[in-house]
Image (spheres, rainbow, N blue to C red):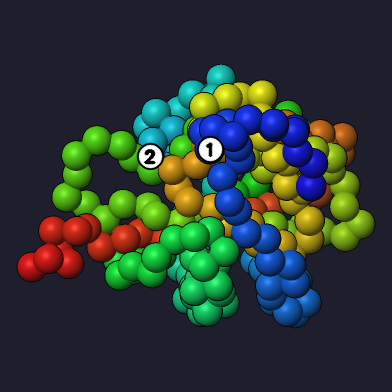
Amino acid sequence: MTATPSLSTNPLHRVPAYAVRDDVLSQQDVAELLAYALEHEAAFAPTGVGGFKAGKALNREIRVSLAMRTPLFKAWHQRIETSFAPLLPGILAELGMRSFDIAKYEIELVRHNDGDFYRRHIDMHTGPSSKARRAISMVYYFHAEPKAFEGGALRIYSLARNDIFTDVAPEQNRLVAFPSWVPHEVMPIACPSRRFIDSRFAINCWVRQVPAETNAA
């Protein structure tokens, strides 16, 4: 992990808290997850911005990757939720956040290959909404061994400055968690072989919070 230093006392000029957990899944789970991705290569579709449906909000200047979401990834949805959910209380404490009522876990499997990236963005929709919002973003990394790509770090920015950030490496079997309102970026990947099996794979998991109006009812 690398970071740019900040001497400012302004909290907006510091990288917000994030949490890292290594060795999250068993080696058997990692192997089975990779096998599942390879078996379903044809089910991966281009990712969009602000939506997943094919052809919706595709913008190759902002985001380039392929993804599989529920229901295609349904076979793994419960296994991932069961593995990640017990980590959430400790993650919330590390992030300085209170516990909240969970509406659902939103999960997608993403493949990044040579030249792929995702520019600076946040995961939370802004503006008025009665829908359950994303509160916590979790990214889990896995790949084939030996690793055949470079780059692809998760860059987490300060809220106010693009020149203050931390890079978190996409290490095998690593989970990174942060508030969904934190700006972040997937740095470009270099994968000379361009083979699907050599990709940087990640599971994006967003924990959606029950709306305040629902809690108050």
Relative depth, front residue between 95 and 30: 95
Q: Is residue 19 above or below residue 195?
A: below
Residue 22 occupies which quadrant of the picture?
A: bottom right
Helix, strand or loop status at disc 1: helix
- 208 left or right of 13? left
Q: Earlier in the sequence, mark 1 or mark 2?
A: 1
As measured in the structure, the alpha-carbon distance from the residue carrying label 1 to the one carrying label 2 is: 31 Å
Q: Residue beneath label 1, please?
A: 11
* Farthest-out residue, left: 217
Front position among marks 1 and 2: 1
Marks 1/2 in contact by CB < 8 Å: the verdict is: no
Q: How far across and how far down the image is residue 183, in percent?
A: 52, 36
Q: How far across and how far down the image is residue 136, in percent?
A: 46, 56
Q: Residue beneath label 2, please?
A: 51
Q: Amino acid at mark 2?
A: Gly
- 184 left or right of 99? right
Residue 46: tell me if it is visible: no
Relative depth, front residue between 140 and 77: 140
Residue 80 occupies which quadrant of the picture?
A: bottom right
